[in-house]
Image (tube, grey):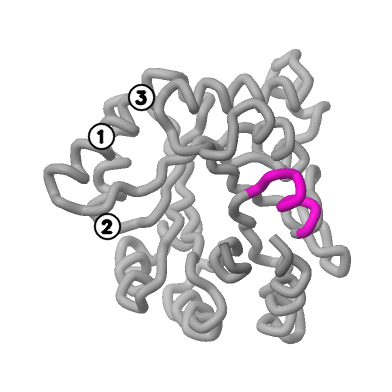
Amino acid sequence: MKPKDRIILALDVSDYDEAVRIAYKFEEHIEIFKVGSELFTSAGPRIVEQINSMGKKVFLDLKFHDIPNTVAKSAAAAAKLGVFMLNVHTLGGLEMMQQAAEALRNVSLDENIDRPKLIGVTILTSLDQAALQDELGIGLRISAQVRHLAGLAQRAGLDGVVASPEDAESIRSHFGKGFLIVTPGIRPSWAAADDQKRMLTPNEALRRGADYLVIGRAILSQPNPVSALKRIEDEIAGF
């Protein structure tokens, strides 16, 4: 893939007009834009429709986590919006993920639309080992828990997972080349860490096996965001 196909630009803003302005600013440089809960709650489906109308793709990052029937219906509704990719929380369990995957297959056939990629969120990159154990009561090491959840996602028929770039190498070695790895927590060496606990540079993430890099603030907070993006593209041009 070309660098522009690997980078998913996170539209982590709450205003529809600002999100559209950013999308047009990067129209020539980005193919996939992430729409998360903040923007989708504020702007609704029209932001997805707008990005699609530009000939671009949407990663709908709403991390569905509910009873299986609710998640399945939510996934089907997202597919009808024409999103390229969406995600669920793997901690919702095997049945929830299986029903979401089945719903996407069914609605894609019924509506004659492309089936979105379905990926599972493992452990948020804002969580560290202490939070996992002391707050959530999960005794496994993060790396072991991530592998377990990735295996559950694969068993459920998902296309891949969202995981820290630190876990990408282990996931790739365990689940093979066909299993997608989408990595947030990407920070170039010249960007601030913000609230990320487990992160790597773009080059390191791809070297460990990531397919897609989700990057937002590390680009948009720079004085010249387009130049910042080009610096990252130059860094990963060899992959």
C-alpha separation, residue under disc 2 versus residue under disc 3: 21 Å
Residue 43 placement (x, y as % from top left): 38, 66
Provide the residue designation for mark 2.
Answer: 81
> Could you tell which of marks 1 and 3 lies nearer the N-terminus?
3
Quadrant housing residue 235: bottom right
Query: Helix, strand, or loop for circle 2?
Result: helix
Provide the residue designation for mark 3.
Answer: 98
Q: Nearer the viewer, residue 111 or 61?
A: 111
Quarter placement of the C terminus: bottom right
C-alpha separation, residue under disc 2 versus residue under disc 1: 14 Å
| Residue 139 shows in this picture | yes
Residue type, mark 1 in image: Ala
Kindly check if marks 1 and 3 are in contact, taking CB atoms under 8 A apart as contact: no
Residue 164 placement (x, y as % from top left): 70, 42
**Magenta segment boundaries in residue numbering:** 203-210
> Could you tell which of marks 2 and 3 lies nearer the N-terminus?
2
Residue 177 placement (x, y as % from top left): 58, 39
Label 1 packing within 10 angstroms: few (<14), some (14-19), many (20+)? many
